């Protein structure tokens, strides 16, 4: 392909109505630059400068991350391309332990001088902080891996796909929505490539090439006479894979009241249904508040898992390191130590997994040079483990980290972040239809909506995209204004059934926020459809005059 | 050096513009320097020091625009970035919403930079944190906190003669104090342009007092209550309302859209005691005097005595609607009264004092219905006195409905949002019939 064809439509610099401040993602580049690579030998040479400078100036441990973070946004609205932007953020982050205390410094001056200066700054920060006091950092031992590499398994690198192809897909999708009677439609293709080089005084030199993709849309239907509007967002998932996710495949679809998708996504089909459903939502019956059995689709349940299981099992939260921002956790160490804490019913089995193919959290090694793995967090309803990194492992009796360390960029310090946390499918064959047959009074919820949970992860409230009333084993129509509230432990103990593996799908988010300064992390959560008995449903309709 | 002076920025941008062969060209440069300390369990957990600088060029042919950026500043790199932006512009489709670049404009001198804040170091940050920890160690409490300072600059210049420069500083501090048993918690947050106004010792004292008074919280029934929202709670709640965008209102998808079409402009939206405006020259909360679109920012009334006074119009939308463009708010100031929080408590027969809110999310953008929770100090008030701490609540409430149930406003103060860390000038407020929908066991 000629460079001109590859660049066609690229680098539009105006009208980014749907994007956050692009400068937050780095500098804008042309898409061809995204295919250039930084030589590993050069990175190793630079990393050694940082490690040697840190050590010779009093650091007992040092690690350096040379990160090149690429993003591509293609943003459209109705029949217009609003923005095509390729951004690159390239720099170094150096973390050290000096005088028993952590120090960190970062710069985008990726030269030997920049490395040395930044390493000195990191040591100075550590020494300044050591004066405040506190227990010295205790790192779990980590063998050096030498020079190793890892790459997201993919068949189509999204950055190699011409922008025009992405624009055509989005505008085709928008066209279907407008022809179907939508008032507004926005669609976005967001691709991420993290080219991360990690080196540490343990003797690891790890080169990783991580790819993620998120196609999404929002269809809006307006009823001006009533002064009301409704939206339906896409049922796609953000994924840790390449552009092959957009190659629709019948075998990767889940049928039922609306199509849902596994490892391949049919955007044109989804938007056709979304357009009808947005209009249906305007006329849908407003829910009667009360107790209902909830049938929760994986496209919805991923967020409930994320908030009520993923976050409270983060060890740094349990210990109090997040107390000033996101909070602490009700899953205190005594509950884990007892070996008897009933987090959920026996149907609830939840794993942490940084190796799951196609997931957002999948990498070869974490951001402090630990090989990734899979482990049980909730086993037959009992809390059996947390998520930990190197300086926490000893607290829960581990001899090595679980590989949960991550930083959103070179300029942020790495810390404990959630791996993929997933509800395991039921072992007994069970379809969604058969699950619904046994529900007397329930609500079937598809897609994620609003979400909120308290600072210890007890009380939560979740909305959704689509709500269907279930009466005497049958879906009888659409509902609106639905949200459910529950207490985490009560909710997971009310889990009566989980469908089998044939229904298992991943949901997830690109932007799980945590830490100060706040950082985003991408994480997936898998499940099959699950049934929760007697959950409190509220009505969210309000009038403001 | 990541912070350029006005003269240095002007010289650099002129040099870059000289390379341009496009019909229109705009160059911007920005940089920041800063650092932070995060502490927990009474010791530093992470800390960092960061400096960055970058330059962006947008070239335009007709309605076709292309942008490229760079973080190298030698002559060859500067010419290369201009050529790349020109190439991308030639290949871009026409953007129907592109507006021609603006010519020269007068931007008033800003008051956003403070040299003391600009001179902060890892040691000065550590000293401020040490003062905070002294309080909690003395009170036998555990502290987790965060201190962050930044100095940033931004400048734009275009081929039509527009030049604008801004430089600013900011420091924010927040601290959460918890007792050993984990049964009580308190919080304080501060944000300033001038670090010499930051007293981490007294802020931590307040957080510690809140914590010590929170022990033994009782559960009371959720329902509708009169509440007193302290500024940090009110800020976080109100932050979701400060979107006075004309386009989404006119498109019918905003809380400012009107039934039957049109917007709520000129209508009484909330209680007459509510006046909200932005003013870049407010000494307690200065902001930039120009917007990203290169428009001057002046004092702008958004809600005046409860009436929607202005909506912001981008240049494109203003042109389409035949009105003057109006940039969105660079800061938000809400007028208050003279009452202290103590006065508001004294005048309350039965109610709840809310120190902080948490995890607020939009439930319904049409009514601006939000859900979230109280946190770090929630107290029951009876006959003008705080009686006892109460367990936290989840609320489901709209700031628009809330401001229609406004009983009184206290004295305005600078406060930060606990999620975005943006600073606002917001008064404490007393609200009747605030909807608490369930109880939370969280401390």
Image (spheres, grey):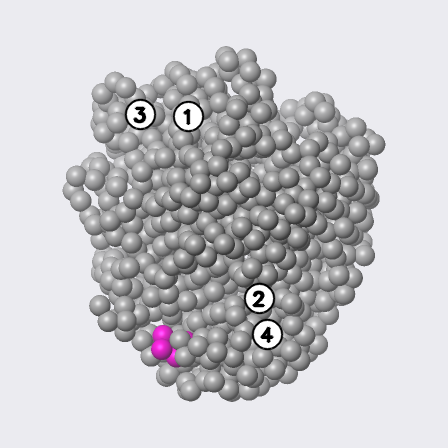
The reply to whether the C-beta atoms of the residues labelled 2 and 3 are less than 8 Å apart is no
Q: Which segment did they paint magenta?
A: B85-89
The residue identified by callout 3 is: A425
Question: Pointer 2 indicates a residue of which chain?
Answer: B
Dot 4: what SS?
strand
The residue identified by callout 4 is: B155
Both marks 2 and 4 on one chain: yes
Both marks 3 and 4 on one chain: no
Dot 3: what SS?
loop
C-alpha gap between disc 2 and disc 1: 42 Å
The reply to whether the C-beta atoms of the residues labelled 2 and 4 are less than 8 Å apart is no
The residue nearer to you, when weighing A505 against B328, is A505
Percent across and percent down for residue A317 are: 58, 32
Left or right for A446, reference B145: left
C-alpha gap between disc 1 and disc 4: 50 Å
The residue identified by callout 1 is: A375
Mark positioned earlier in the residue sequence (3 or 1): 1
The reply to whether the C-beta atoms of the residues labelled 1 and 4 are less than 8 Å apart is no
The reply to whether the C-beta atoms of the residues labelled 2 and 1 are less than 8 Å apart is no
């Amino acid at each position: 392909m000629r460079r001109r064809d590859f660049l066609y439509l690229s680098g539009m610099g105006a009208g980014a109505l749907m994007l956050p401040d692009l400068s937050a993602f780095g500098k804008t580049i042309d898409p061809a630059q995204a295919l250039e690579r930084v030589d590993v030998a050069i990175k190793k040479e630079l990393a050694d400068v940082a490690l040697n400078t840190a050590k010779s100036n009093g650091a007992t441990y040092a690690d350096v991350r040379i990160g090149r973070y690429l993003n591509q946004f293609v943003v459209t609205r109705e029949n217009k391309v609003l923005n095509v932007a390729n951004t690159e953020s390239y720099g170094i982050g150096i973390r050290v332990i000096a005088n028993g205390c952590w120090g960190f410094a970062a710069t985008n001056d990726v030269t030997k001088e920049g490395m040395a200066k930044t390493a000195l700054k990191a040591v100075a920060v550590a020494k300044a902080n050591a004066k405040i006091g506190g227990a010295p950092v205790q790192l779990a031992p980590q063998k050096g891996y030498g020079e190793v590499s890892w790459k997201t398994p993919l068949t189509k690198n999204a950055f190699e796909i011409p922008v025009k192809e992405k624009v055509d897909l989005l505008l085709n999708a928008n066209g279907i929505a407008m022809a179907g009677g939508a008032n507004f439609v926005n669609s976005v293709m967001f691709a991420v490539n993290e080219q991360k080089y990690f080196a540490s005084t343990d003797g690891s030199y790890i080169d990783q090439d991580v790819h993620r993709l998120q196609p999404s849309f929002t269809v809006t239907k307006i009823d001006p006479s009533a002064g009301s509007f409704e939206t339906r967002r896409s049922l796609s998932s953000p994924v840790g894979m390449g552009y092959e996710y957009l190659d629709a495949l019948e075998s990767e679809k889940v049928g039922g009241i609306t199509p849902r998708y596994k490892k391949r996504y049919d955007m044109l089909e989804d938007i056709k249904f979304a357009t009808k459903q947005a209009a249906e939502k305007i006329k849908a019956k407003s829910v009667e508040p009360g107790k209902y059995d909830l049938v929760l689709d994986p496209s919805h349940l991923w967020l409930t898992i994320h908030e009520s299981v993923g976050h409270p099992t983060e060890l740094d939260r349990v210990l109090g390191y997040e107390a000033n921002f996101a909070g602490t956790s009700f899953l205190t160490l005594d509950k884990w130590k007892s070996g008897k804490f009933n987090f959920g019913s026996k149907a609830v089995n939840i794993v942490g997994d940084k190796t799951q193919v196609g997931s957002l959290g999948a990498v070869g090694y974490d951001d402090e040079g630990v090989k990734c793995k899979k482990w049980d967090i909730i086993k037959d309803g009992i809390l059996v483990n947390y998520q930990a990194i190197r300086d926490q492992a000893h607290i829960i009796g581990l001899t090595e980290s679980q590989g949960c360390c991550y930083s959103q960029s070179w300029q942020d310090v790495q810390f404990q972040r959630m791996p993929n946390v997933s509800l395991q499918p039921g072992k007994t064959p069970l379809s969604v239809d058969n699950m619904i047959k046994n529900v007397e009074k329930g609500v079937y919820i598809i897609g994620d909506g609003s979400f909120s949970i308290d600072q210890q992860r007890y009380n939560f409230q979740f909305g959704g995209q689509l709500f269907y009333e279930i009466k005497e084993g049958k879906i009888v129509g659409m509902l609106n204004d639905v949200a459910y509230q529950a207490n985490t432990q009560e909710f997971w103990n009310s889990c009566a059934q989980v469908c089998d593996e044939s229904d298992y799908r991943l949901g997830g988010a690109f932007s799980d926020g945590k830490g100060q300064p706040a950082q985003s992390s991408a994480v997936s959560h898998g499940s099959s459809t699950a049934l929760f008995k007697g959950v409190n449903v509220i009505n969210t309709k309000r009038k403001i005059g | 050096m990541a912070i350029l002076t006005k003269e240095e920025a002007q010289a650099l941008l002129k040099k870059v513009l000289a390379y341009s062969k496009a019909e229109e060209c705009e160059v911007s440069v920005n940089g920041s320097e800063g650092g932070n300390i995060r502490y927990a369990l009474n010791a530093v957990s992470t800390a960092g020091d960061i400096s960055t600088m970058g330059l962006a060029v947008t070239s335009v042919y007709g309605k076709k625009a292309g942008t490229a950026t760079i973080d190298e500043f030698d002559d060859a790199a500067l010419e290369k970035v201009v050529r790349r932006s020109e190439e991308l512009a030639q290949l871009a489709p026409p953007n129907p919403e592109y507006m021609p670049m603006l010519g020269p404009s007068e931007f008033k001198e800003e008051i956003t930079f403070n040299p003391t804040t600009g001179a902060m170091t890892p040691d000065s940050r550590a000293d401020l944190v040490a003062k905070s920890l002294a309080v909690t160690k003395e009170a036998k409490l555990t502290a987790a906190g965060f201190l962050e300072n930044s100095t940033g600059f931004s400048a734009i210049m275009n081929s039509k003669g527009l030049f604008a420069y801004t430089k600013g500083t900011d420091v924010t501090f927040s601290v959460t104090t918890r007792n050993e048993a984990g049964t009580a918690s308190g919080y304080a947050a501060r944000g300033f342009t001038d670090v010499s106004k930051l007293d981490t010792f007294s802020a931590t004292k307040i957080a510690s007092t809140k914590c010590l008074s929170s022990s033994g919280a009782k559960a009371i029934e959720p329902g509708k209550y009169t509440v007193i929202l302290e500024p940090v709670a009110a800020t976080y709640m109100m932050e979701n309302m400060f979107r006075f965008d004309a386009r989404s209102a006119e498109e019918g998808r905003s809380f400012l859209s009107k039934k039957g079409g049109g917007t709520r402009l000129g209508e009484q939206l909330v209680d007459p005691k509510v006046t909200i405006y932005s003013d870049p020259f407010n000494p307690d909360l200065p902001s930039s005097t120009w917007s990203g679109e290169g428009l001057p920012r002046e004092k702008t009334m958004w809600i005046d005595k409860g009436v929607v006074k202005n909506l912001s119009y981008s240049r494109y939308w203003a042109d389409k609607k035949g009105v003057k463009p109006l940039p969105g708010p660079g800061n938000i100031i809400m007028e208050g009264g003279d009452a202290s929080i103590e006065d508001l408590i004294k005048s309350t027969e039965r109610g709840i004092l809310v120190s902080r809110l948490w995890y607020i999310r939009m439930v319904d953008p049409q009514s601006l219905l939000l859900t979230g929770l109280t946190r770090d100090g929630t107290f029951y008030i009876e006959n003008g006195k705080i009686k006892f701490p109460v367990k936290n609540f989840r609320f489901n409430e709209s700031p628009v409905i809330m401001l229609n149930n406004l009983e009184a406003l206290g004295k305005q103060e600078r406060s930060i949002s606990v999620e975005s860390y943006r600073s606002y000038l917001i008064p404490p407020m007393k609200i009747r019939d605030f909807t608490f929908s369930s109880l939370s066991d969280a401390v």
